[in-house]
Amino acid sequence: MVCLHAKTKDVIDGIKKGLENDGMADLAMKIRESGGDDDDDGDGGSGDGDKSRELGRRDQFHKTEIYLPVVLWAESETVRQLDYEQDILLGLDWRAANLDALAEKIPLDTHATETQTTRIGMADGTKGEYFPTDTPQTRQDKLSFDPVYATRVITDIVPNPWIARALVGGLLDSLRARGFDDDRLGALGGLILEALRKHLLAERDRLAESQFIADVAAGKIQFRLRTDRNNWRLPHSMTTELPKTAPQMLRDDGRHTEKSLFAPVYQADFNQAEREFACYIDEAKALQWWHRNVAKSGHYFLQGWRKNKVYPDFIFALDCKSDKRRLVVLETKGDQLEGNLDTAYKRKLMERLSESYQFDAAIKAGELELVGEETEIVCDLVLMSEWKSVFHNRYLVMEATGG
């Protein structure tokens, strides 16, 4: 039984390690072995680990109100959280999509789909006697390219069917101008649709980013601390499913973390890289507090020009020497994910939001009044190999020296 338990643990550790390497550390932390050391009642179940319970803030932060800006849509009298479908996707100007480049990439002389048929006959009544088989014949199916079907295939990318149909028509016109006849379009229909979808996904992100930037400049998209309650309020308690006896996180000096907003801090809530980072910043003199954000509904997120929300890994406050108060919203990535599309997007979004951040200093009668000092919000992404160099110099040294 002990050997089986060890093997099961090795399998679980392997799965979690693979998820972490693929950038899905939050999913990895949700995988836990049932039973085992966390079972307090001895019945083979997971004991207290199956029961959600609340963790409170540390005493010194119990009365501290913490607000963070969210990405808002603000037009006329409307102020609400940015909605990707309504505010980004439906507003894209697909007339700016470049389909000529796509038409040039589809080769005219590529091989079309072919099928091979063989007809076999078998005699009746005589065991083991067969009719001769026909010689295998290879033929090319006669297919036609259906623009209506093609339109349906891309409406998850281009929601307006009229615009989608116009894009399909424009691509067909460009292909015909290159010499594609109806037979060739039909024969290469699968290839054309696959290439069209891939191209439109890239064009959607390009157009969305351009529109996002333009709307920020026009004040329609805002990222600022406001005085009208349109901020995210960091809660005073959080839930955990870990038992009270679960191992707590220890720093290199052997002490428990001291500056986490909530306590206690359980080791199983962090992957290895996050544990090292959290313990490192916990010892920084410039740090007031830190909080590990969770990638699920109800927790802090940033909405950008892509559909999926971005849940930053850490939020922390720095004790600045200047008059400004600084809150840092940080996304961390493993080095193996540097350069991939998701990392590049998140880095760019963090930079855009930091650049556009403004503090709404006007106090409106009857509305929420923020703390008097001006607050600076910085959004950033660092690789896990950078936090002892780039991160340290960018935040901890500057604040400690009053820079």
Image (cartoon, rainbow, N blue to C red):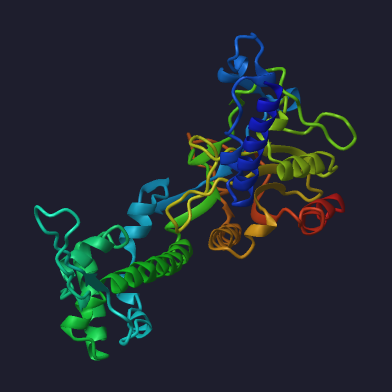
Name of the residue lying farthest toward the left:
124
Which residue shows up at 65% across the image and 42% down it?
14
Q: Is residue 348 left or right of residue 88?
A: right
Residue 52 visible in the picture: no
Given residues 141 and 138, the one toward you in this image is: 138
Decide if residue 122 is on the left or right side of residue 211.
left
Residue 207 rendering spot, x and y as whole percentages? 40, 69
Measuring from the top left, give residue 140's x and y in whole percent.
21, 77
Residue that lies at the very extreme toward the right in this rendered image: 253
Picture residue at 79% right of the left edge, 43% below the top: 281
Image quadrant occupied by the N terminus = top right
Vertical comparison of 194 with 349: above or below: below
Can see residue 89? yes
Q: Position of residue 22 (x, y in %)?
A: 59, 52
- Where residue 192 sits: x, y (%)? 29, 74
In the depicted view, which residue is nearer to us: 87 or 132? Answer: 132
Which of the two residues, 359 or 222, is positioned nearer the viewer here? Answer: 222
- In the figure, 364 relative to 180: above or below? above
Residue shown at the point (56%, 19%) measured from the top left: 50
Q: Residue at x 58, y 42 (%)?
A: 68
